[in-house]
Image: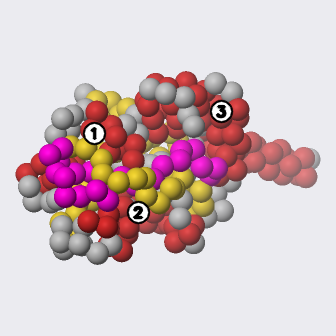
């Protein structure tokens, strides 16, 4: 009887642990200032990343809570365990892969140079030698801008600050992720700004996890399944107005 009771207690303990694991709320870090991937509309967070993660969570039966934060704080939050996932148009690069794990890439991007619509002096990054360039702190764009020959690189916590600096004349150009630049040109910057030069540094975006997270492989499988079916294509059409390339 004692052995049976001990076994029953152990089974109950294991079942309770499993139930707790299944009911755990996943904390998802995101940077909600990156249109059209993540941004606030009224009292809701919307965008391609938000919709994609919601579809992934439903497919895997995950409960989650979005936790908006500065982009620069996402990887430290993953390292300290303050968040379980980070989705924020984050470029997969070797330096980041040293400290976090990425799921299968879900978007192919690159960098674009944006200048005032009437500017004819900048045709590409080779023309930035005596120019002031603005971009977002802690991003691949910032690393790229610092590698160029420029007069000055101005860094902002949010890309909106760089856009405003360009409009105010405090910067001659903005370098940032291509989808965000193109979205801005079509919306708030229409008729005021334009791109200059080609697409620089082709780069994939990935969903990031703490190293060793069991969620990484599950999310990768779901992303691949979505890409083979219609889920990814429909979300892409919704936010970018075309089929994924």
Q: CA distance from mark 2 to mark 1?
A: 19 Å
Where residue 142 appears, as percent x and y from the top left, is: 33, 65
Q: Residue at x 69, y 40 (%)?
A: 224
Q: Is residue 118 magenta?
A: yes
Q: Residue at x 62, y 52 (%)?
A: 103
Q: Nearer the viewer, residue 72 or 13?
A: 72
The quarter holding residue 45 reads top left
The residue singled out by tag 3 in the image is: 226
Q: Nearer the viewer, residue 34 or 23?
A: 34
Query: Of helix, strand and loop, which one carries label 3?
Result: helix
> Where does the magenta region start and end?
103-124
Q: Residue at x 59, y 56 (%)?
A: 102
Among the two numbered marks 3 and 1 on one chain, the one whose residue lies closer to the N terminus: 1
Q: Is residue 117 above or below residue 153?
A: above
Among the two numbered marks 2 and 1 on one chain, the one whose residue lies closer to the N terminus: 2
Q: Residue at x 18, y 66 (%)?
A: 132
The residue singled out by tag 1 in the image is: 184
Q: Is residue 231 above or below residue 192?
A: above
């Amino acid at each position: 009887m004692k052995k049976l009771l001990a076994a029953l207690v152990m089974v109950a303990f294991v079942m309770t642990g499993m139930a707790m694991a299944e009911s755990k709320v996943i904390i998802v870090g995101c940077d909600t200032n990156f249109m059209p991937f993540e941004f606030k509309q009224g009292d809701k967070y919307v965008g391609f990343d938000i919709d994609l993660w919601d579809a992934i969570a439903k497919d895997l039966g995950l409960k989650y809570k979005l936790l908006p934060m500065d982009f620069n704080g996402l990887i430290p939050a993953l390292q300290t365990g303050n968040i379980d996932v980070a989705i924020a148009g984050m470029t997969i690069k070797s330096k980041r892969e040293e400290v976090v794990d990425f799921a299968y890439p879900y978007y192919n991007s690159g960098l674009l140079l944006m200048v005032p619509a009437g500017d004819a002096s900048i045709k590409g990054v080779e023309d930035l030698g005596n120019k002031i360039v603005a971009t977002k702190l802690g991003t691949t764009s910032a690393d790229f801008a610092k590698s160029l020959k420029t007069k000055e690189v101005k860094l902002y916590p949010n890309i909106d600050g760089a856009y405003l600096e360009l409009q105010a004349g405090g910067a001659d150009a903005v370098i940032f992720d291509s989808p965000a630049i193109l979205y801005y040109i079509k919306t708030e910057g229409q008729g005021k700004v334009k791109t200059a030069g080609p697409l620089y540094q082709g780069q994939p975006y990935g969903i990031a996890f703490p190293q060793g997270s069991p969620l990484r492989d599950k999310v990768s499988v779901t992303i691949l399944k979505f890409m083979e079916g219609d889920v990814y294509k429909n979300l892409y059409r919704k936010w970018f107005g075309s089929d994924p390339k």
